[in-house]
Amino acid sequence: MPYQSLTLPEFAAKFATTDACLEGIIARRWPQGWKCLKCGGHERHRLRTRRVLQCANRTCRRQSSITSGTIFGHAKLPLPKVFLAVYLMTDKQGISAMALSKHLGCHYDTAARLLRLLRRAMADHDRSYALEGVVQVDEAYVGGHGDGRHGVGRSRGTKRVIGVAVEQRASDISGFVHVDVLAAANANSLHGMILEKIRTGSRLLTDNWKGYCGIGDKGYDHDPIKSPGKQRASLQWPLVHRAISNLNRWLLGTHRNYCLRHLPDYAAEFCWRTNRRNRSKHDHTHNSREATLPDRLLTLACTQCRQKTTKKKAA
Ligand SMILES: [Zn+2]
């Protein structure tokens, strides 16, 4: 049931009622058809008063919740509003919690919590991806004041340090992008990110910052190039610099007064939407009728949920 190229009014009309939303969730949660976990039967009916499917086998009658274990089960909003939030979040520039609360007519905290749940589903889903081939890696600073490069060495001041890795598919074509919020721009943090997100055997393109020293001994082809200065560095590693600049623009444009505490969640959303945009643009092995972002996020919301966050890795 693809929702390709549905306009906002069409989407809102399609999922205007709780019943329609529940049918949408059932179709995505059990794409091969529902199966009873007790008797293995496929016949079922939906209870009208509760969000539950009941096995049609008279001797079984096992019930399964439609929304528990999904974001829809945790969201404190009517289902049509959650569906609408998914659509609005996948708009080109995304949406802030403040704007979403105005669109849905709900409290800011409720909108912020829903966006956080969706971002963490994105993070969980993308955790399995690893970058490979030729990968540009750099670190950058977000939040706070100034450009972050002033000060002693690479001290961050009020900013947070992020590590950014971008696959270089051709001289000017990006593959997958990964952004990690780091404890510091040191070898411990940078090596940790590289080892976790980039397959060994890949070729790493970095500047000669000491934080990258020794990574070549850990299974990577690493040839650091002396940084030629800020202006020329962005020409030398254009893909990773473009990703950093896009992330900064998106944070300042859509989220304005974003909280640095939630930076890992924002980074997860940025990577999720960038990676899907890059893939549909450049990977011609994919079907041209590939699902749109609202499709993908709805499926994610139906199948992936992490209510409590585990602390991000320390490095
Ligand atoms: Zn059954």
Image (cartoon, grey):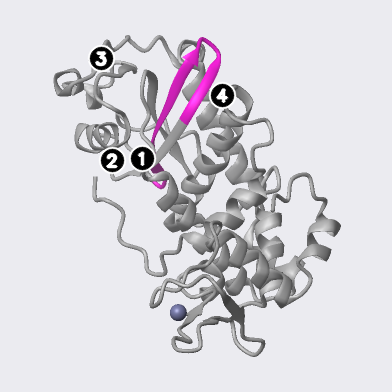
Q: Quadrant of residue 97?
A: bottom right
Q: Is residue 52 above or below residue 198?
A: below
The one nearer the camera, 155 or 5, is 5
Could you tell me the amino acid type at mark 4?
A: Thr
Magenta span of residues: 158-176
Number of residues whose C-alpha sits closer than 10 Å to that of mark 2, classed few (under 14), some (14–19) or many (20 or more): some
How far apart, in angstroms, are the residues tagged by discs 2 and 4?
Answer: 38 Å
The disc at residue 222 is: 3
Number of residues whose C-alpha sits closer than 10 Å to that of mark 1, classed few (under 14), some (14–19) or many (20 or more): many
Secondary structure at numbered mark 4: loop
From the image, give the main secondary structure of the stretch colored magenta. Answer: strand
The one nearer the camera, 148 or 180, is 180
The disc at residue 285 is: 4
Could you tell me the amino acid type at mark 1?
A: Arg
The disc at residue 184 is: 2
The one nearer the camera, 98 or 294, is 294
Q: Is residue 222 above or below residue 108?
A: above
Q: Nearer the viewer, mark 2 or mark 3?
A: 3
| Precedes in sequence: disc 2 or disc 4 | 2
Residue 65 horizontal/vertical position (percent): 50, 79
Q: Nearer the viewer, mark 2 or mark 4?
A: 4
Could you tell me the amino acid type at mark 3?
A: His
Residue 36 horizontal/vertical position (percent): 45, 73
| Precedes in sequence: disc 1 or disc 2 | 1
How far apart, in angstroms, are the residues tagged by discs 3 and 1?
Answer: 25 Å
Q: Would residue 4 be visible to someone looking at this image?
A: yes
Residue linked to disc 1: 156
| Precedes in sequence: disc 4 or disc 1 | 1
| Precedes in sequence: disc 3 or disc 1 | 1
Secondary structure at numbered mark 1: loop
Q: Is residue 235 left or right of residue 4?
A: left
Could you tell me the amino acid type at mark 2?
A: Ala
